[in-house]
Amino acid sequence: MSSAAHDTKIRRLHTRKSKKASLPFAPEKVWIDKKVADHPQTIRILNKLKNCDYDVVDNVKKLKRPSDLSAAKKQMVLTYHKGDAFKPCQGIGNEHLCCNYRVIDLISGCPMDCSYCILQSYLYNNPRTTVYVNIEEILSQVATFLSKNSQKFFRIGTGELGDSLALDPIVEFASVMIPFFASKRNAILELKTKSTFVDHLLDLNHRNRTVISWSMNTPEIIESDERDTASLDERLEAAKKVAAAGMGVGFHFDPIIIKKDVGEMDRYIKVIDRIFDELEPKQISWISLGLLRYPKDLPNLATQRFPDTSLFTGEMVPSGNKMRYLRFIREEAYRPLWEHLKSKLPPHKIYLCMETPAVWEKVDPTVKGNSCIEKRLCNTESINFDYQAKPTIF
Ligand code: SF4
């Protein structure tokens, strides 16, 4: 038993060792908050993890402390989310333009392992993958918010503190969320992933209220710095399945990496061309662009774990609470990608993620504020239905 077990008064229930994980990313160890030990979602998740070692914990807060991240990624904590699990994206309200996105925290942590992942910094004090089993309560917060703000339309996602689908074969939250959003008039759900775990979602009744999005990068960066994620070909294959099922598909080129100079954007242009070889523009809800940015402590944390990574070699400057490439480099890097995307997709389906008004001014001067980006993305072509034309609740 680990040292955490000693100081958390853990009641050991069973130990069933796995010979071979039958589920992708099945944890080696599950810690169960005593308060949710009998919760139906806990029982359902444990039934899927029959070969896993698990313990019930009296005080789950004592598990929140720094520990080796690679080991912590193989552990799962089942608990409940107190307070507000539904909130504005962290981009809202700072000096960068944001699309007024909202996020739902259902999972914090990720079993995949990207060198640039900001969770290495954000979750430093709480690195174990945490799953909030009170999903129904959390969705009722969302339902109340949507009905109180029925005149507005919202894009809502789950991928802020982890990958939306990497653990879905185990937790199956997407199968709850997609029908929930199908019943809503004024919101669309976005599930962002680097996995291919979509097969279990294809037959769900989504009513055009779900977009599944892939983070995209060059095959070289995927190979060198996105450990345990799907390859570019696999992501595109999964996106084709989702499009064939009638759901929206999105892509996020984020983080775009400049190691030496903006000539490297040619590699990203090839990836854009791959997308349009495989999908029709009308099947794509949106594509975003976001250059590498990170909290100041990230290079130190990441290079301790991945000494061979060359991601942190570009010249960066402090901007807000993050490090970013110099502004003129960002403008030069975005311009060819934006122009290339514009030749394939209407401009209202393209946006920059968390960029300054000054950079937007150079890339697309028609965009003047958050509500402008929001309005462009919530057009009927992107979301594939006209929510304003349907005044009654479905
Ligand atoms: S897939 Fe996303 S959340 Fe997971 S390690 Fe990579 S960047 Fe972090």
Image (spheres, grey):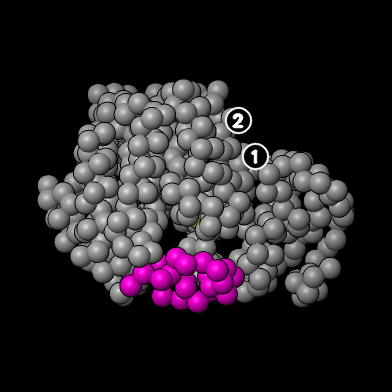
Percent coordinates x, y for residue 63 in the rendering: 67, 69
Q: Is residue 99 magenta?
A: no
In this rendering, does residue 273 appear at all?
yes
Task: Tell me whether the residue at label 1 lies in contact with that at label 2, contact meaning CB atoms closer than 8 angstroms.
Answer: yes
The amino acid type of the residue labelled 2 equals His
Q: Is residue 297 magenta?
A: yes
Percent coordinates x, y for residue 306 in the rendering: 57, 68
The one nearer the camera, 152 or 206, is 206
Residues shaded magenta: 293-316
**Does label 1 or label 2 sit earlier along the sequence?**
1
Q: Residue 197, relative to residue 262: is it above or below?
A: above
On the picture, is 152 further left or further right than 313?
A: left
The one nearer the camera, 363 or 126, is 363
On the picture, is 81 further left or further right than 337?
A: right
Percent coordinates x, y for residue 23 in the rendering: 72, 42
The amino acid type of the residue labelled 1 equals Pro
Q: CA distance from mark 1 to mark 2?
A: 8 Å
In this rendering, does residue 165 appear at all?
no
Q: Residue at x 25, y 24 (%)?
A: 389
Q: Secondary structure at mark 2?
A: helix
On the picture, is 129 further left or further right than 118?
A: right
Question: Image quadrant of residue 264?
Answer: bottom left
The one nearer the camera, 347 or 181, is 347
Residue position for label 1: 169
Q: Residue 143, relative to residue 329: is it above or below?
A: above
Residue position for label 2: 200
Q: Answer yes or no: disc 1 within 8 Å of ligand 1.
A: no
The C terminus sits in image quarter: top left
